Image (spheres, rainbow, N blue to C red):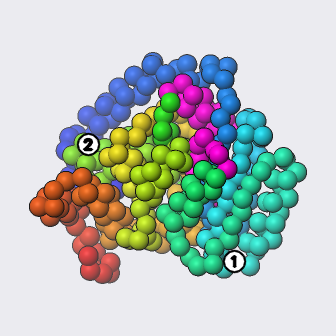
């Protein structure tokens, strides 16, 4: 995926070898992360989920949280319903409350009065996480499924490294309109060539853990500008990197991600203009770190990487 008309800065074989070398170095250096009892687990974690009109998949996502091999007394679930209009959502949220009560997991479930989009709802999750004194907030989308070892690995690595932000790989699946699911690929979340990543960050995944105080200190997720466009996660990683937050990549797939699932921001919206608008959020953060006279240079370079030239996309 990415920009359709972009030429690679190097042959694909070079990118592939660079990624393989990186993975080898990660595994060699950090294999201890995955050994049992390699670090004491004791951090309180908030699991934050934003949801909009997907009651069935939200229920499945929460089900994978209940299967976590992590102390339930250290888990707090936060669900932000972004003003869903699906009539099934109210009964689903009621069922989820009962499930969490039955399993001894504390929670906050809030229903918005207007559709605010994921950046705003995630920022509210960060505020609640801080109020609940969570050491980390681990974000999930409402169509993702966590592996049972997701939280233990996240928190083990957090304890060993003191990271502000933790990200990981994902196993990606395609789903048809008929509901058939097929494995697609494993995303390793390390982006592409440096020249490409400078303008279009592809490092990091939508499921990640962050210290809520650190995230709020840098402004959380960017809101307002193109708030209904994709790449909220990559935009946050851009901001976190610019503010020197310590980011750790865990070389293990900790969750399953369903690509272009029904109701997602990408469902039926795969144009170059959607991509362009999403990437624009990253540039706005970059612009705040360079003199004003360079802003046009940044925007021109991004535009040259992939012009949103499909007629039906509308003006840029």
Q: Position of residue 161 (x, y in %)?
A: 50, 27
Which element carries disc 1, helix, strand or loop? loop
- In this rendering, would 32 be left or right of 314? right
Q: Which residue is mark 1?
A: 86
Residue located 48% across and 34% down the image: 163
First-in-chain label (1 vs 2): 1
Task: Report crowding for label 2: few under 14, some 14 to 19, many 20 or more residues within 10 A (C-alpha).
Answer: some
Distance, label 1 to label 2, CA atoms, is 42 Å
Residue positioned 32% across, 78% down in the render:
313
* Residue drawn at point x = 45 percent, y = 34 percent: 248
Residue 193's tag is 2
Reply yes or no: does residue 150 show up in magenta.
Answer: yes
Tell me: 101 left or right of 177: right
Magenta stretch bounds = 132-161
Q: Is residue 116 above or below residue 5?
A: below
Q: Nearer the viewer, residue 315 or 310?
A: 315
Image quarter in which the C terminus is found? bottom left
Viewer-side residue, 252 vs 178: 252
Tag 2 secondary structure = loop
Residue 101 locus on image (x, y percent): 85, 53
In the picture as drawn, the residue positioned furthest to the right comes out as 102
Residue 202 in sight in this render: no
């Amino acid at each position: 995926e990415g920009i359709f008309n972009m030429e690679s800065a190097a042959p694909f074989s070079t990118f592939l070898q660079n990624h393989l070398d990186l993975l080898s170095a990660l595994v060699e250096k950090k294999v201890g992360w995955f050994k049992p009892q390699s670090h004491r687990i004791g951090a309180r974690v908030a699991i934050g989920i934003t949801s909009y009109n997907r009651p069935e998949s939200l229920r499945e996502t929460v089900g994978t949280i209940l299967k976590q091999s992590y102390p339930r007394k250290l888990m707090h679930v936060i669900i932000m319903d972004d003003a869903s209009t699906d009539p099934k959502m109210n009964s689903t949220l009621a069922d989820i409350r009962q499930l969490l009560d039955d399993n001894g997991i504390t929670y906050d479930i809030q229903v918005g009065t207007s559709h605010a989009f994921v950046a705003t709802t995630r920022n509210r999750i960060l505020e609640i996480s801080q109020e609940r004194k969570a050491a980390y907030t681990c974000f999930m989308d409402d169509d993702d499924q966590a592996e049972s070892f997701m939280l233990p690995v996240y928190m083990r690595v957090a304890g060993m490294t003191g990271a502000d932000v933790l990200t990981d790989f994902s196993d990606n699946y395609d789903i048809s309109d008929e509901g058939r699911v097929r494995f697609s690929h494993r995303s390793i979340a390390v982006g592409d060539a440096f020249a490409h990543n400078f303008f279009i960050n592809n490092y990091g995944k939508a499921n990640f853990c962050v210290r809520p105080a650190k995230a709020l200190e840098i402004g959380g997720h960017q809101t307002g500008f193109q708030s209904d466009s994709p790449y909220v996660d990559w935009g946050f990683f851009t901001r976190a990197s610019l503010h020197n937050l310590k980011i750790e990549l865990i070389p293990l797939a900790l969750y399953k991600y369903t690509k272009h699932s029904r109701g997602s921001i990408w469902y039926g919206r795969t144009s170059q203009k959607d991509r362009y608008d999403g990437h624009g959020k990253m540039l706005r953060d970059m612009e705040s770190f360079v003199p004003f006279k360079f802003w046009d240079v940044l925007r021109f370079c991004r535009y040259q990487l992939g012009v949103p030239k499909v007629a039906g996309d509308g003006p840029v």
